[in-house]
Every structure is written in C-alpha cells, then in structure tokens.
Amino acid sequence: MSARFAIEKLAMAHKRDDFTCGNNQIDSYFRETVSQDVKRKYATCFVAREIATDRVAGFYTLSSSNVPLTEVPEPLAKKLPRYPTVPAVLIGWLGRHSDYAGQGLGEALLFDAIKTVATAPIGAHAIFADAIDDQAAAFYAAFGFAPLMRRPRTLYLPVATALRLLSP
C-alpha cells in the first residue's frame, strides 16, 4: 500500500475536480470547501496521492475538538479526570475515491490519521470521528471506535487504544 500511495498535506497542486467517493456531501466538501477550512485553520487536510499518476485517491481532515465528559461512554468516562470536557482531535471528513474501493485505502487513511494524532506533540485524550452515515459509523466501529451516548454517529477512540492499534 505505502509504495503505491503517498499521504501528504493538501496542496494547490492536488487536483480535486474529478474526486468522487459515492457520497455527494463528501465529494462537494472535498472539491469546493476543504481549501477554505484549511486556510481558516479549521482543519488540516491530508491526501493519499497515487504516486504513478499523481491522482488524489483519498483524503481525511483533522481538527482540534473536545466533547462533554457526559457524552463519553461510562466505562471510559469513569477513568477520566472530572473536567467538563475531554480534549480530542476530530476526524471530520474521510473519503476514498470510488475507483480505489476494496484496496484497503480507507483503512490506510484511517491508520494514518490515528498515527498523526497519536504521535503529535499536543495533549489529546481521544480521537473522534463524525460518521456521515451508518455505513461510515460501522467502518469506524470495526476499528474500536465507540459511539457517544447521545450522538451515535460521533465515535470515540482513546489515544492509548489507538497506539495499540498501531503496534505490530
């Protein structure tokens, strides 16, 4: 996988016009809005570029975030300090071009996002993912993300757990 794709920060040279993952909302965001979010520092965007063709095969965004402690599933919340919010990083958007379906690229993007967060020199207890639909929620759940109490499409993964996912 890694020899075929390079995952790098979004740049002007990355062509986004023909990106299609099968979800109009994700496609529209990536083609039309992500640059503004990056410019405003609302998000950082990373793209998977196919090395042989320079084609954008997928992307994800990361943003600083937090969640009320009362939203965290009880088994996890009882282990946390009693601060009103839990510091976190949000995977706000993740999309894989439909031409690359079934090749493990979605998983590679997720693991790159997890690695980026888990190794960043900033405090964050958890990684959150905003799933756009039930299929996306199931994707994150398959990697150990747990839904929040009142927002089942927002899923939570402690960074300590994420680090174990990355270990061979």
Image (cartoon, helix red, strand yellow):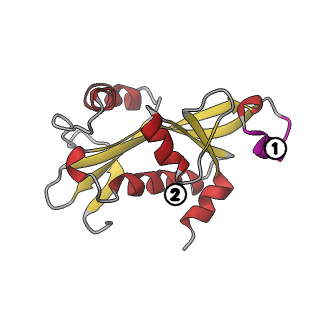
Image quadrant in which you'd find residue 6: bottom left
Q: Which residue is mark 2?
A: 115
Question: Is-magenta flag for residue 78?
Answer: yes
Q: Is residue 109 above or below residue 86?
A: below
Amino acid at the residue labelled 1? Leu
Asked if the residues shown at circle 1 and circle 2 are in contact, with their CB atoms under 8 angstroms apart, the answer is no
User: Is tag 1's residue or tag 2's residue first in the polypeptide sequence?
Assistant: 1
Quadrant of the rendering where the C terminus is positioned: bottom right
Q: Check disc 1: other Cα within 10 Å, few if <14, some if 14-19, many if 20+.
A: few
- For mark 1, give the secondary structure: loop
x and y, in percent, of residue 120 in the image: 57, 53
Q: Residue furthest bottom?
A: 168
Question: Is-magenta flag for residue 160?
Answer: no
Q: Which residue is mark 1?
A: 80
Q: Which residue: 79% across, 45% down?
A: 75
Foreground: 50 or 79? 79
The residues colored magenta run 73-82
- For mark 2, give the secondary structure: helix
Q: Which residue: 43% across, 39% down?
A: 135
Any mark on residue 110, and which? none
